[in-house]
Image (cartoon, rainbow, N blue to C red):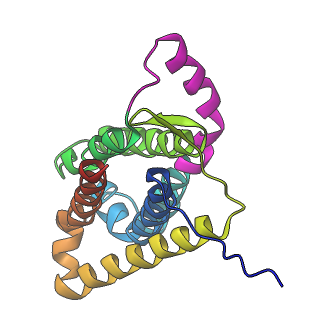
């Protein structure tokens, strides 16, 4: 009889599926509020379709991660901490103001989504995080549990924000609170690493 027990080992890279799930849940939950904030002069239905596409850019941009990885190796910048980059990336949408022109606001948000997708995709490859080469195996149960936990917490944070604040406040920029929560969570992971 085989009595050996398999242990689940966690490393720093295991937080990335959680952050990925958190990112997916928060950004797709905020599409309605983002469309009324960024595209207030457009019809809401058209704005929602545009923002769904822009939010999906984080998935579409992941096909370019190998080119970015090669570029980082050529520039000798491959010893970067991806958590620190994600922390600063989450401040990009916070700088968007209601007075910005539509194209500038959408451009800033597109840059945020594209680079977030590339950085998260880079983290799934064997990259250095704090001088440790780690990779994520998406076929492991641990990956899917952490992704589901990220989706769950993202939905929970969104519902909590939606219950605490009025739709008027969230439409006028209150959605930025969720990006601050994610940035603080990523900073905590970075500090604890």
Say if residue 103 shows up in the picture. no
Identity of the residue drawn at 66% across and 72% down: 6
Identity of the residue drawn at 31% across and 55% down: 189
Q: Quadrant of residue 159?
A: bottom left
Q: Quadrant of residue 121?
A: top right
Question: Residue 132: horizontal and vertical position, in percent?
Answer: 47, 37
Identity of the residue drawn at 34% across and 56% down: 39
- In the rendered image, residue 68 lying in the magenta stretch gets the answer yes
Question: Residue 173: horizontal and vertical position, in percent?
Answer: 19, 62
Q: Nearer the viewer, residue 37 or 40?
A: 37
Say if residue 34 shows up in the picture. yes
Range of residues picked out in magenta: 58-80
Identity of the residue drawn at 36% across and 45% down: 83
For this view, does 181 lie left or right of residue 116?
left
- Which residue of the protein is positioned furthest toward the right in this rendering? 1
Q: Nearer the viewer, residue 21 or 131?
A: 131
- In the rendered image, residue 179 lying in the magenta stretch gets the answer no
Q: Is residue 77 above or below residue 159?
A: above
Question: Residue 85: horizontal and vertical position, in percent?
Answer: 34, 38
Q: Majority secondary structure of the magenta segment?
A: helix
Q: Nearer the viewer, residue 163 or 45?
A: 163
For this view, does 36 lie left or right of residue 20?
left
Considering the image in quadrants, where does the N terminus appear? bottom right
Question: Residue 103: horizontal and vertical position, in percent?
Answer: 35, 39
Q: Is residue 32 above or below residue 50?
A: below
């Amino acid at each position: 009889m085989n009595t050996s027990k398999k242990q689940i080992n966690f490393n720093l890279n295991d937080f990335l599926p959680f952050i990925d799930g958190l990112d997916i849940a928060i950004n797709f939950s905020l599409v309605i509020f983002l469309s009324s904030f960024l595209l207030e002069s457009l019809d809401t239905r058209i704005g929602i379709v545009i923002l769904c596409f822009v939010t999906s850019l984080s998935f579409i941009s992941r096909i370019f991660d190998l080119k970015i990885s090669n570029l980082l190796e050529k520039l000798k910048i491959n010893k970067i901490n991806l958590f620190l980059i994600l922390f600063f990336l989450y401040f990009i949408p916070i700088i968007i103001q209601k007075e910005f022109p539509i194209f500038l606001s959408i451009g800033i948000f597109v840059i945020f989504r594209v680079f977030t997708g590339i950085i998260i995709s880079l983290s799934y490859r064997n990259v250095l995080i704090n001088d440790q080469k780690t990779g994520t195996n998406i076929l492991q149960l641990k990956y899917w549990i952490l992704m589901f936990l990220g989706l769950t917490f993202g939905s929970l944070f969104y519902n909590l924000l939606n219950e605490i604040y009025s739709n008027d406040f969230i439409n006028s920029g209150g959605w930025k609170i969720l990006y601050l929560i994610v940035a603080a969570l990523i900073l905590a992971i970075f500090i604890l690493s």
